[in-house]
Image (cartoon, grey):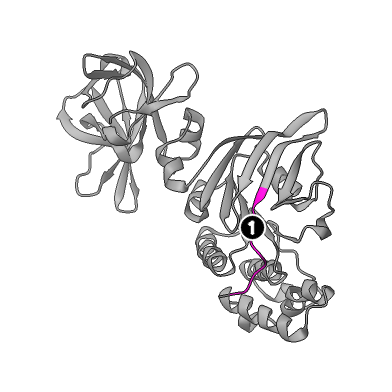
Amino acid sequence: MITGAKQVGIRIEAAVKSFGRGQRAVDSLDLDIRAGELLTVLGPSGSGKSTVLSLLAGLAEVDEGRIWFGEQDVTELPPEARKVAVVFQSAVLYPHLTLRESISFAPKLAKTPKDEIDRRVTEAASWLQISALLDRRPHEVSGGERQRAAIAKAVVSRPALLLMDEPFSALDAQLRRALRTQVVRLHQEFSATTVFVTHDQEEALGMGDRVAVMRDGRLEQIAPPLELYRNPVNTWVANFVSLQPLNLIPARYEAGHVSLCDGAVRLAVPDRELPAQFTLGVRSENLRLKPAGEGSLRVLTAEAVGEQVKYTVAAPDGTQLVALGGADRVFSPDAGVELAVDWPRAMVFDPDTGERVGAAAA
């Protein structure tokens, strides 16, 4: 087990940060980060997620609100007094120094004993698989290796809070997956409170103990990954936190049946009363296709997704739906199909506000 800094919980209270013409990058944000957790912050460009990271690091000041590290109010503290380490999109290493010298630079400034520095560097390099590269300079290693070194540089300073701002965005998909696994394992060992900012849904859901979803400077929802995926609070979160296209379908309910696609689809609903009108949310893996001969729904496209097939299906009213199916039964384009819904996994939203009403089945 790597010996880290004392774990600390983080609290942001009613934080506001504006730029330019008063546009709020962060708008009345309340956020509690648990001591020792890995929190992923997910949102589109302009949602305020990187601004939150800058506020925590002290690289930007709040206009309103307070920031607490445990019981300490750090709102007015400069970055160097906060015991925070940041890993940016591009690796910040000293070009004239070896990786070993860059990684050990901060502990040396802090007058950490040499034996302790060597131990920390050896541990971090081993975990991040760069032990053989420590005596090379940044231009002599690959981009992924430089980013590993930047992570090691952050870890050896034993921060109270580790901040990571889309550190894998410039890397290819295979390397991103490998580094995600290494960072999660490193966090399990080091256990520093960690905030990982990303716009990648797969990354956020795969790494975080919890995921905080931001939109227009506000926190839409915070929850563990599976809870967030299964129980989004509104249609925006449901659609954004989706690895495949989400089906949001206007629906009518009457006498135990749901009518979709202007009446082209009529489905029985087991054991549940629903609003007379609502928006039905069904993820593609929870929408099943059955052969229907000359059915009113037609397959437009069939795309291989690993061992599954992603279908786009058209209804007579122009509605297009997406369903995932196994490769054991493949529907050809223009085939007639019927729909079946996995009701325990379906979602019901208010058609006007987009807010979650409840699950579509008990």
Q: Where is 13 relative to 7, above or below?
A: above
In the rendered image, the residue lying farthest to the left is 293
Q: Where is 282 relative to 266, above or below?
A: below
Instruction: Identify the image quadrant of residue 140.
Output: bottom right
In the rendered image, the residue lying farthest to the front is 71
Which sits in the foreground, 306 or 272?
272
Residue 70's spot in the image, x, y percent? 69, 53
Residue 16's spot in the image, x, y percent? 75, 35
For the N terminus, the quadrant is bottom right
Which sits in the foreground, 202 or 255?
255
Position of 264 with respect to 85 (left or right) is: left
Instruction: Identify the image quadrant of residue 214.
Output: top right
User: Is residue 81 within the magenta segment?
Assistant: no
Question: Within 10 angstroms of label 1, few (less than 14), some, or many (20 or more) residues?
Answer: many
* Amino acid bearing label 1: Pro
Q: Residue at x 80, y 46 (%)?
A: 75
Q: Which residues are magenta?
A: 2-10
For the C terminus, the quadrant is top left
Number of numbered discs overlaid on the protein picture: 1
Position of 305 with respect to 6 (left or right) is: left
Q: Residue at x 23, y 35 (%)?
A: 289
- Residue 319 can be seen in this image: yes
Which sits in the foreground, 35 or 312?
35
Position of 323 with respect to 42 (left or right) is: left
Pointer 1: what residue? 167
Residue 104's spot in the image, x, y percent? 75, 76
Callout 1 secondary element: loop
Residue 198's spot in the image, x, y percent? 60, 49
